[in-house]
Amino acid sequence: MSQRTYAERDAVDFVIVGSGAAGGVLAKELSTAGFDVVVLEQGPWQTPAQFAHDELAVERQGVTLNTAVEPVQTFRTSAEDRAEVRPTNTPDFRGLLYRRGVGGSSVHFTANYWRFRPIDFNERSVYGAIAGSGFADWPLTYEELEPYYTKVDREIGVSGAPGPFDPPRSHPYPMPPLPVKSSGVLLERAAAALGLHAQPAPMAIASRPYDGRPACMACGRCMYYGCEFGAKSSTLVTTIPRAQATGRCEVRTDATATRVETDARGRATGVLYRDRDGREGHRAARAVILAANGAETARLLLLSTSPRFPYGLANSSGKVGRYLMFNGGSATGGRFEHPLNEYKGHVVSRIIHDFYDADPKRGFYGGGGIDARLNSGPLGFALTGLPDDAPSWGRGYGRAVHDYYAHTVRFAGHTTSLPVETNSVSLDPEHVDAWGRPALRLTYLDHPDDMKTKQWFQDRTHELMEAAGAAHVWREPVRAATGGVHLLGTARMGNDPRESVVDRFHRAHDVPNLFVCDGSSLVTSGRGQPTMTIQALAFRAAEHIARFARAHEI
């Protein structure tokens, strides 16, 4: 599809940094509302025809990830420690991970689309303060966000069916659930045996032809991969084509933002960027929207210093980059006598939400959901999927891979992650990326309640696996987080400018024509599947940003 191209000298209404889950929604909403929009995307534009099932390249070498072009990240558990250098080009790298390219990580996500519940927005009021955390209520409610969840259902394309613990919804799912898999049947069996409730998993994957896109072809390459059929509802195949069709939206690829420019009044005037060859460009705009994810948005704000903003743009609170949350996780593996063939089809078909809410009786804060899945292709499984008691070399190893792969399933817990102020993304003073920007420095240590939650959920998945009748059951190690793909909380929203970066409409407290809307603006983490909430927030933010623009308040 051809698109309009704006000259550098033309000041557009909005420049949006990032084309992923939030950026793609914002681009569509603002361009269809009649505004001129330029999206700066640091990666390439891949069409569905370019997506391949090359497990070595995609899963082990990370060719579509940020790590393919960033030589290094650094990591420490506290500000008192010297950050260790972590080369990113290793298959077992665990740091700040996201996809570069049009559609962002919505292209390669698993497509779990859980809504937050009303409790997610006011847990601080319900449970009280939690020592060692920045636990806080959101400045909005589920009821305010519900119409935008419905908009995600319809405009992005979500399949599913309501479950017994789902929050109120104003409209039904636009598509029925995807077919149940072997893993889903086993989870249903285990749940029934333990008095729990398994329900169809809501997925951003078409279960029938929808909005000009085909239904899922069950190719088995969802997680980590782009969908060559367009059945997975990424912004690449949903909102971005609609934005382009307006004739008011340009998506500029291989354009890595390096700085948000401001004038003497402290207002944003545009974004500096570098193209694929390192040449610098400037995209002037009347307002700037950052939707680059919880790592890149924080880095860009911290890079955008000036005499007026010596500690980074929109950072008078000192909270930019802080309160990073990843979501927790733990799992139990199981081998069954009969083949399951979990490598086929969509990743998840059934979930359990009986333990979604925190429960003070557990003695710690934390809640989450459980699903059934197999995470990897045969190569990844051979390297990391076998239980510890399986042979690790020779003919025995080969037989184990053959015997386990088609017979194995994981019951996985997806859990809360508390906002801790010292958990952060910052600029490393000693290392740079491929464009000369300071490398991403990750400072992270799980809150003790997060570790207890992971362990508690593993106990539940172990019980479920035994109830499902697995012939062999094993616990996967419960590890402290050292990275993740859910990059949340680093520019949190709030009513108090001293404690937050943006207000309830995603406008920066310090800069009236700067907006931040992506995972960074989340106040709490939810239960492990944040993308639907990120997109609901983006639909809501776009509506208010357009209102501000029409009222000349930007």
Image: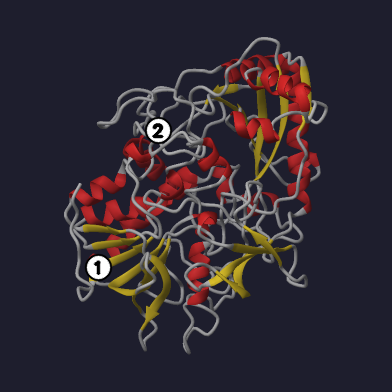
Label 2 belongs to which residue?
158
Left or right, 341 with reference to 423: left
Give the colouring mode of the picture: secondary structure
- Image vertical order of residue 430 relative to residue 168, above or below: below
Q: Give whichever of 531, 142 is nearer the camera.
A: 531
Count every numbered label the image shows and give the total: 2
Residue drawn at the location 32% of the way across and 37% of the way down: 49
Q: Residue at x 46, y 24 (%)?
A: 161
Q: Is residue 192 visible?
A: yes
Q: Residues within 10 Å of mark 1 (few under 14, many from 20)?
A: some
Q: Residue at x 54, y 70 (%)?
A: 496
Cα separation, mark 1 vs mark 2, equals 31 Å
| Residue 181: % across, % down | 54, 18
Q: Which residue is mark 1?
A: 13
Helix, strand or loop at disc 2? loop
Badge 2 local density, few (<14 within 10 Å), some, or many (20+)?
Answer: many
Q: Amino acid at mark 1?
A: Asp
Q: Secondary structure at mark 1?
A: strand
Residue 334 as seen in the image, left or right of residue 110: right
Q: Which mark is residue 502?
A: none
Q: Residue furthest right?
A: 389
